[in-house]
C-alpha cells in the first residue's frame, strides 16, 4: 500500500496557498532554495522570492477553480501526482478550462518541496 501521508499534507498546504495567495502560505510549502517548474521546457522559479512573486502575480484568488488529484507513485522522497485543474469560468477566455497535470514533487525531510 502506498503511504501518501507526507504528500497529502504538502498538497493540503499547496491548496491553502492557492486559495490565499498569502506569501507565508506559499513559503511554508517550499524550501528556501526550491525550484518550481510551472511548465515544461521553461526555466524554474527559484527560491522563495521568485516563487512568491510569480504565484501572487497570477491572482488565483480572483478566479474560481477546483483541483482533484491522485498520488500515482512514490519512490523515496519523489511523488508522482496526477491532477485535474478546472476553471469553470475560464482564465483568459469565457467558458470552462480544464488542465490535466502530472507533477513530480520531491519532498525534503522538512516536508517541503
Image: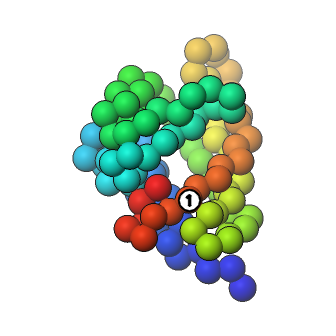
Please say which color scheme the image uses.
rainbow
Q: Residue at x 68, y 21 (%)?
A: 95
Report the quarter where the N terminus lies: bottom right
Residue at image location 37% in from the left, 68% down from the top: 110
Residue 70, x across and y down, in percent: 69, 62
Identify which residue, 16 or 48, lies in the foreground: 48
Q: Nearer the viewer, residue 88 or 5?
A: 5
The image position of residue 28, as x and y in percent, is 32, 54
- Up the image or down, 105 lies above or below 74; here it is above
**Against 87, is 70 above or below?**
below
Residue 1 appearing in the image: yes
State whether residue 17 appears in this view. no
In the rendered picture of this protein, how many numbered marks are placed on residues?
Answer: 1
Local packing at callout 1 (Cα closer than 10 Å; few below 14, some 14-19, many 20+) is: some
Q: Is residue 74 left or right of residue 43?
A: right
Q: From the viewer's perspective, is residue 30 above or below residue 4?
A: above
| Coordinates of residue 55 in the picture (x, y in percent) | 41, 32
Residue located at (56% from left, 59% from top): 106
Determine the residue located farthest toward the top in the rendered image: 93
Image side of residue 110 versus residue 6, left or right: left
In front of the other: 97 or 112: 112
- Reading the image, the residue beneath label 1 is 106
Q: Quadrant of residue 65?
A: top right
Residue 91, image x, y percentages: 57, 21
Amino acid at each position: 500500500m502506498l503511504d501518501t501521508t507526507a504528500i497529502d499534507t504538502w498538497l493540503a498546504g499547496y491548496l491553502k496557498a492557492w486559495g490565499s495567495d498569502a506569501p507565508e502560505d506559499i513559503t511554508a510549502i517550499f524550501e528556501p532554495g526550491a525550484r518550481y517548474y510551472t511548465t515544461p521546457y521553461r526555466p524554474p522559479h527559484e527560491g522563495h522570492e521568485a516563487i512568491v512573486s510569480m504565484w501572487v502575480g497570477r491572482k488565483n484568488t480572483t478566479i474560481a477553480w477546483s483541483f482533484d488529484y491522485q498520488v500515482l507513485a512514490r519512490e523515496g522522497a519523489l511523488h508522482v501526482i496526477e491532477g485535474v485543474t478546472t476553471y469553470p469560468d475560464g482564465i483568459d477566455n469565457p467558458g470552462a478550462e480544464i488542465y490535466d497535470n502530472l507533477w513530480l514533487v520531491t519532498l525534503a525531510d522538512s516536508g517541503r518541496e
